[in-house]
Image (cartoon, helix red, strand yellow):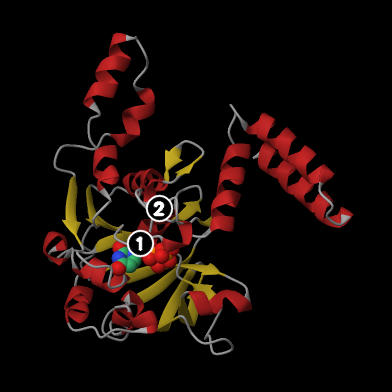
């Protein structure tokens, strides 16, 4: 079997981000920062680390801040240069000319529909998908782990991440088959299964490597859960026709599309930073120390902070 190299990534950023209103009224959710980097930057950095060269953004109205972020900020840079300020912090926002493509999804009809909008740019090649509101913290990064597996077995690979029973109804869930190390054979996929019907606890946290044939399936894909065109339903139709695996991610997932997850990501990332970690850690300790929570909870938080600070 010839395994085609993975060169392209699709970043669907056309969603409405209603869970973050009013912050996301005039600003894309993907531009929310975790410490000092917007979510979309973490995702693009993860793609670059995995050797991906071509970034395809599926945007919508009101998302132009993302385009500007990956462009030259002429005035800012000229002024900074004049004042002798270092440009180092802007380095990661520079992509090679021609390495970014934008396509608009006119209406947010679902993730499957967003991906399908990129079909002509993806062409006849395997491609990765990143949902930037899922911040995947790992060494190596999540997509790099998946690409290493892809280079061995090819086909379709989705990321897999264990969640508690009472959360499976929020996500795309894997029906697992034979397991080989971190690789899990995918026998079935279901989007937002009703409570008590999930085939496992293995959810798909927004990282995929897919073969281009999924675009043909999406062409005629009917609406699924939530009245949206679901990527999960289209992927499910590839099972049996092409190899399909899940990769158990070795690392931490932060659901930054959710307010609590977003705050937790900021805390975890801040604590790991040399420049602000000690200060934030001291503040968190003081805050939790004053909090009328049970002593065990305070102790637990304290342990977590200690571990994060050490990391
Ligand atoms: P979500 O459902 O998490 O994002 O979609 P949302 O709709 O933006 O947020 P809420 O639920 O209203 O707060 C997962 C990903 O798919 C993209 C989103 O931008 C997000 O990255 N998406 C979703 C699209 O690009 N188009 C769509 O039609 C739907």
Label 2 lies in ligand 1 vicinity (Cβ under 8 Å): yes
Residue 205 visible? The answer is yes
Q: How far from the left and from the top, in percent, is residue 111?
A: 31, 70
The image quadrant of residue 13 is: bottom left
Q: How far from the left and from the top, in percent, is residue 288?
A: 78, 45
- Of residues 186 and 219, the one nearer the viewer is 219
On screen, residue 272 versus residue 211, left or right, reads right
Question: Quick check: 269 above or below 273?
Answer: below
Residue lying at the far right of the rendered structure: 295
- Of residues 265 and 162, the one nearer the viewer is 265
Q: How far from the left and from the top, in percent, is residue 130?
A: 35, 58
Residue 209 visible? The answer is no
Residue lying at the far bottom of the rendered structure: 197
Quick one: quadrant of the N terminus? bottom left
Ligand 1 location (quadrant): bottom left
- Of residues 28 and 190, the one nearer the viewer is 28
**Cα separation between marks 2 and 1:** 8 Å
Question: Residue tagged by mark 1?
Answer: 16
Quick one: quadrant of the C terminus? top right
Q: Which element carries disc 1, helix, strand or loop?
A: loop
On screen, residue 167 versus residue 174, left or right, reads right
On screen, residue 178 versus residue 77, left or right, reads right
Label 1 lies in ligand 1 vicinity (Cβ under 8 Å): yes
Q: How many marks?
A: 2
Lower sequence index among marks 2 and 1: 1
The residue carrying pointer 2 sits among few (fewer than 14), some (14 to 19) or many (20 or more) residues within 10 Å by Cα, namely some
The residue carrying pointer 1 sits among few (fewer than 14), some (14 to 19) or many (20 or more) residues within 10 Å by Cα, namely some
Question: Residue tagged by mark 2?
Answer: 24
Q: How far from the left and from the top, in percent, is residue 159?
A: 43, 66
Do residues under tags 2 and 1 come within 8 Å of each other at their CB atoms? yes
**Residue at left 18%, top 52%?**
102
The image quadrant of residue 158 is: bottom left
């Amino acid at each position: 079997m010839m395994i085609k190299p993975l060169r392209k990534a699709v970043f669907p950023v056309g969603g409405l981000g209603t869970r973050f209103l009013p912050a996301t009224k005039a600003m894309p959710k993907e531009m929310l920062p975790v410490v000092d980097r917007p979510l979309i930057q973490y995702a693009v950095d993860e793609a670059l680390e995995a050797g991906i060269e071509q970034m395809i953004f599926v945007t919508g109205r009101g998302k132009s801040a993302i385009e500007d972020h990956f462009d030259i900020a002429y005035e800012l840079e000229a002024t900074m240069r004049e004042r002798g300020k270092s440009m180092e912090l802007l380095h990661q926002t520079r992509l090679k000319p021609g390495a970014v493509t934008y396509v608009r999804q006119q209406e947010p009809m679902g993730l499957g529909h967003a991906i399908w909008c990129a079909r002509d740019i993806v062409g006849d090649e395997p491609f990765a998908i990143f949902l930037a509101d899922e911040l995947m913290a790992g060494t190596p990064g999540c997509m790099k782990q998946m690409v290493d597996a892809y280079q061995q077995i090819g086909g379709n690979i989705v990321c897999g991440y264990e969640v508690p029973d009472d959360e499976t109804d929020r996500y795309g869930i894997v029906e697992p088959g034979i397991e080989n190390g971190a690789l899990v054979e995918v026998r079935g996929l279901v989007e937002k299964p009703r409570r008590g019907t999930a085939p496992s606890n293995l959810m798909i946290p927004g990282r995929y490597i897919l073969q281009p044939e999924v675009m043909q399936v999406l062409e005629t894909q009917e609406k699924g859960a939530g009245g949206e065109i679901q990527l999960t339903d289209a992927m499910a139709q590839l099972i049996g026709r092409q190899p399909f695996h899940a990769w158990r991610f070795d690392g931490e997932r932060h659901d930054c599309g959710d307010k609590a997850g977003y705050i937790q990501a900021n805390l975890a990332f801040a604590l790991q930073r040399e420049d602000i970690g000690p200060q934030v850690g001291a503040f968190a300790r003081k805050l939790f120390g004053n909090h009328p929570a049970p002593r065990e909870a305070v102790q637990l938080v304290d342990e977590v902070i200690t571990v994060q600070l050490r990391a």
